[in-house]
Amino acid sequence: MVESKKKRGRETAGDMVRSLGLVMAGVVVVFFFAQPPDSDTERIRPVDAAGDISALRADVPAAPVPGDLPDRWVSTVSSLTGEPRGLRIGYNTPSGEYAEYAASTAPADQSVEDLTGRGERLDPVDVGGAAWQQYRDDDGSLSLVRAYGAVTVVVGTMRATAPLSELRVLAGSLTVV
């Protein structure tokens, strides 16, 4: 006996339900394996920026870099760029906010605009006897800017959420060796 093939277009509701069930089983498997582990939530992952700081100091000896910070300042990101030379280090502050240190050998006007989000220039602030220019961008982020010869340093940047008091701590920690 020869069985004839079913003609296309004669699928039943049962066929559709079985097909949908297979697709949903695949979705459930992907969903299960795509979940982040519980240990991945709200945990600060420290990053050691010492290598990037050493590399910047080797190429640009006059660049001021963050020194010792009080307890509970945790570096969470560090990025060193080529030409123009630049270093960015992000910190989780004691109050749980974000502060960033950025140094660049790019022309000062370009660095300041890029890192402050073309923020509004405010009155300068004093940090350890040195005047730092203050900027506030459209979303309220504060930045402190100071030139050290060919190096422009921005503390805060347009991504920062830290208050002025914590930006002053970070700016005050800068050292030139």
Image (cartoon, helix red, strand yellow):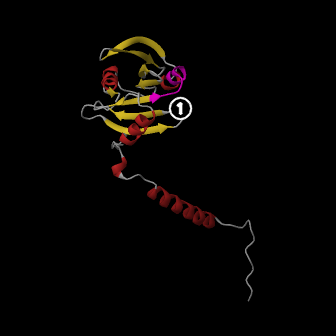
Residue nearest the viewer, comparing 80 with 117: 80
Whether residue 2 is visible, yes or no, is yes
**As drawn, 105 above or below 75:** above
Residue at the spot 31% in from the left edge and 23% down from the top edge: 172
For this view, does 17 lie left or right of residue 97? right
Residue beneath label 1, please?
Answer: 84
Residue at the spot 48% in from the left edge and 28% down from the top edge: 104
Q: Position of residue 59 (x, y in %)?
A: 45, 35
Q: Residue furthest bottom?
A: 1
* Res 169 quadrant in image: top left
Q: Position of residue 103 (x, y in %)?
A: 44, 29
Quadrant location of the C terminus in the rendered image: top left
Residue nearest the viewer, comparing 118 with 146: 146
**As drawn, 17 above or below 152:** below
Point out the stretch of residues depicted in magenta.
103-112
Callout 1 amino acid: Pro
Q: Residue 101 lies in magenta, yes or no?
A: no
Residue at the spot 58% in from the left edge and 66% down from the top edge: 18
- At mark 1, the secondary structure is loop
Q: Residue furthest top?
A: 123
**As drawn, 104 above or below 135:** below
For this view, does 7 lie left or right of residue 59? right
Whether residue 77 is visible, yes or no, is no
Q: Position of residue 168 (x, y in %)?
A: 32, 21
* Res 15 quadrant in image: bottom right
